[in-house]
Amino acid sequence: MSTRILIEHLARVEGHGGVFVELDGDRVARVELSIFEGLRLLEGLLRGRSYEDVAPIVSRICAICSVAHTVTSLRATERAFGVTPSPQTELLRDLLFRGENIESHALHIFLLALPDYVGAPAATAVPEQWQASVALGLQLKKLGNLIQQTVGGRAIHPVNAVLGGFGALPTIDQLLSLRDALVQGAADAQAALDALCALPDVGGCEADRQVAALIPPGPYGYYGGGEIAIARNGTQQRVRADEYRVLAAERSVPHSHAKHSLFGGEPFMVGALARLTVNRERLTPAAAAAAQRLALKLPSRNPLDNNKAQAVELVLDIDHATRTVERLLERELRPEPPPTVHPRAASGTAVSEAPRGLLAHSYTYDDHGRIVAADVVTPTALNAASVERDLRRAVEQRTTEDLDGLRRQLEIIVRAYDPCISCSVHVVQKRHAV
Amino acid sequence: MNRPTVGIFGLSGCAGDQLVILDCEDELLDLVCLLDVRDFLMASSDNDETCHLDIAFVEGAVLSRRDATRLARIRERCEHLVAIGTCAVWGGVAAMDRDADRDQIITTLYGETGRTYDTSPAQALHELVEVDCAISGCPIEKEQFLGAVADLLNGNPPLQPTYPVCTECKMRETACLLLRQGSTCLGPITLGGCDARCPVLGIPCVGCRGPVDDANTRAALAMFRELGVPAEAVARKLRTFAPVAIVAAPHGGDR
């Protein structure tokens, strides 16, 4: 007899998606992550647009990852036209990425995921003993937004990051306020960790997993990097970031019209857990201590550990951001007129780590600096195959025949990936299969 | 209105306007005391999908039959429909080339399978249903959202800015990017309320908030022409965030 589980519209995630599972007796016949986000076709609409217009348009792919989209886009265009940003610009961009990561992770951990662990439908409805944690989460989220406002000019869709540099530089007063906020943030993060350590185990699923993450050029970070590491069972392969398409190699799967990203024929996971797995030697002492307190063992077999990995990155980013702000205060920011851009017929590719994982932008321009072709590969699209495989494992490993319980488990697993479905349609489009 | 029932919805877009609501970190807990939020899928897994709503905030453009059906359903069940964000108000970036050959773009991006997808050219909410109040912005400004909530709670129609970005830019005493540098700054014809966020950073306005009500587009175009900005570049910029407005004003909006 066939049993169906349908999650029509996933809650507490960004965008529109659902889950469909079909059991044929004990056999798992079908598992699908369906995505029904409207197609905005931005890569298609970019064709013919001038290089100057590209970053503000692609920023709109996703609000939560708008720094990653904007700056990765700028870097791809700079690489096409041979523009090299100054060290000061690189430092500010690194800081901007950390601001986005802090905001995005605080939002996910405390507002979207935490309710699952404490049996509440929303962060605004958690039992009294968890309300202080939600308040801490909101303060951390605000800190991330303050960094984005200070450097990027706006918390969502940063306007201040432009080709080759920034429109205006943060003032000394702004940097001093930011430093104070970061000091408070470091304390808030430690208090929040106390709460996260006390969260009950809510399951998930167990499986060997392949992960992929960018190797940062310097300290653990999200901006820049020329190589992607793909790790599994303690072994690691590397591919050049320019060759990101190797990872986005798409395969049709029999159970849906969707195409899946595989490496070596296997799904892979991107995001905070993947980054920590690949770069665990680069953790700051405070971040390493956080991982230990959260009992996060790497490599991990459970996708729910992505929630813990995000908490570790929160600590790490506050650490690094504090140091960056101190450096900026010591050396004083100097106005640098943005370099003159000479458009030419050329291609440029840039790969970054968005909060949810690997993000690639690649453009081909004509002589006049107009887009001939644009390719954007987003982390949620890369994760789709891995999400489905984990959902399948969770159904296979179920310890209960209670369908509602199983349904909740499946939701918790999808949510742990922190999917950003607005982004995902920019490579993978899936049909609702019911 | 005493603790109105509220729904917060996203159609197709980047979720930036819902994120602005969640970005009200200092006000969020007070907001849920003042508003009885019944349906907010991005933030809650316990939603009443059928109850009457005093206020529905809707972001995103309509890009599929599914979006259109959801919007019609939201309209039926709500008293005040508030469009939030440039996509909901003007179609936004997805509408920038509404007349482009969508089938061709879809098959280029998604292959033949793309032909089976539920997809339609982007539309602003007002093209399909009656909209009671529009808060534009890409994304909306937090203060305007909170102000609209306060107005609605007090039974007043939400007041939105009626002046262009230029006005705020002058009030902030910014050196004019257009006249001094000849940049393609859309400040003169773009709805204010952002406190001239971009020009004060030295970045020309890209028009992300859509046109101001009495935009004198014809005069602005003449000025750009005088400054030597190619007409094609201006047209392209005008089409990016609020193409519906350009269609709505075939004579250049000159009043």
Image (tube, rainbow, N blue to C red):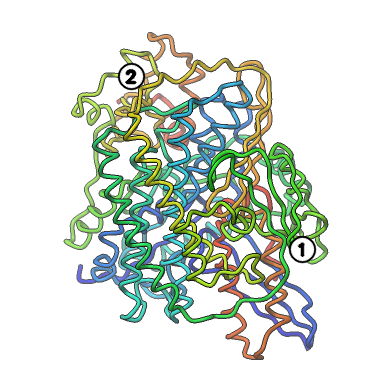
Give me the disc on residue B177: 2
Helix, strand or loop at label 1? It is loop
Q: CA distance from mark 2 to mark 1?
A: 52 Å
Can I make out residue A259 in this image? no
| Subunit under mark 1 | A
Q: Amino acid at mark 1?
A: Ser
Question: Residue A366, located in which quarter of the rendered image?
Answer: top right
Query: Is A223 placed above or below A391 here?
Result: above
- Residue drawn at x 33%, y 56% as measured from the top left: A185
Badge 1: how crowded within 10 Å, few (<14), some, or many (20+)?
Answer: some
Can I make out residue B89 in this image? yes
Mark 2 vs mark 1: same chain? no
Whether residue B132 sits left or right of residue A55 in the image: it is: left
Q: Which one is in front, B87 or A161? A: A161
Quick one: quadrant of the N terminus of chain B?
Answer: bottom left
Question: Residue A410, located in which quarter of the rendered image?
Answer: bottom right
Give me the disc on residue A75: none
Q: Are marks 2 and 1 in contact (CB under 8 Å)?
A: no
- Residue drawn at x 70%, y 63% as measured from the top left: A386
Q: Amino acid at mark 2?
A: Leu
Counting from the top left corner in percent of width and height, residue A270 is at 63, 56
Residue where numbered disc 1 is placed? A256
Q: Comparing marks 2 and 1, which lies closer to the viewer? A: 2
Counting from the top left corner in percent of width and height, residue B22 is at 36, 59
Counting from the top left corner in percent of width and height, residue A346 is at 68, 22
Q: Which one is in front, B234 or A153? A: A153
Question: Residue A338, located in which quarter of the rendered image?
Answer: top left
